[in-house]
Image (spheres, rainbow, N blue to C red):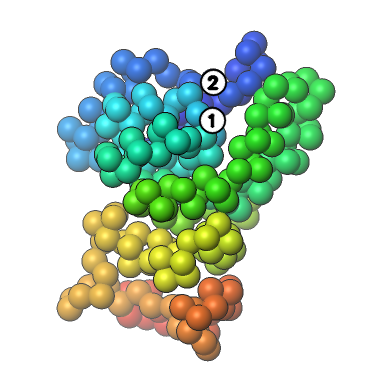
Amino acid sequence: MKLVGDWIDREAGDLTACWPREAVEAAIAEAHRLGARVTAHCFAEDSLRDLVEAGIDCIEHATGLTEETIPLFAERGVAIVPTLVNIATFPGLAAGGEKKFPRWSAHMRRLHDRRYDTVRSAYDAGIPVFVGTDAGGSLPHGLVAAEVAELTRAGIPPLAALSATTWGARNWLGRPGLAEGAPADLVVYEADPRQDVRVLAAPRRVVLNGRVVA
């Protein structure tokens, strides 16, 4: 289940939390009772502590992580999906809202400016980091390779960035990895992506459930 943790409040002129603490506590508890996990869109700082302390499993974007909330995420094992390819659009969004919402625009620029430091600090603290792109809205699908490259620019080691989009992500989602009887889902490359993650953008073969599909 995905929540929208924060969004621009037109009256405040900036990002604010969308839900009171008791609402997210009830929603997350019910999702967990039904066997689901919960993630939330969050750009800013203010909603993160409530969501984590309410038991959330993951945060998408997580640009608002700070020295105060990073240890909390690490302690609770809450994962993040940084979507750095999405965060790259922040300056353009800020420019478009400058006249009407100057506080929000300045905030978005600050979040963008420290994006790599935020992701690396999260990784260094032991927070699980996974790959996602937030595609399907303003961004096209097919940006996973670009997101892996962005994670390495943030200072995450290439092997860890690969894990974040393959076996590590499958394990976190409860999907089988390289195990006997698991689905034969493979992507084949001309070169070793552990040496250069840029090859992810040019697969030679894609195999899904044991069948070559591309």
Question: Visible in this render: residue 145?
Answer: yes
Viewer-proximal residue among 178 and 91:
91
Which residue carries the number 1 mark?
Answer: 44
Question: Visible in this render: residue 147?
Answer: no
Q: Residue at x 22, y 35 (%)?
A: 32
Q: Residue at x 76, y 28 (%)?
A: 97
Q: Is residue 116 left or right of residue 48?
A: right
Find residue 16 and name its label. 2
The answer to whether 187 is drawn above or below residue 71 in the figure is below
The quarter of the image holding the N terminus is: top left
Q: Residue at x 67, y 25 (%)?
A: 104
- Residues packed near mark 1 inside 10 Å, few (<14), some (14 to 19) or many (20 plus): many
- Secondary element type, mark 2: strand
The answer to whether 42 is drawn above or below residue 89 in the figure is above
Quarter-wise, where is residue 53 in the image? Answer: top left
Q: Is residue 26 left or right of residue 2?
A: left
N-terminal-most mark, 1 or 2: 2
Do the residues under discs 1 and 2 have CB atoms within 8 angstroms? yes
Viewer-proximal residue among 95 and 34:
95
The answer to whether 173 is drawn above or below residue 64 in the figure is below
Find residue 33 and name its label. none
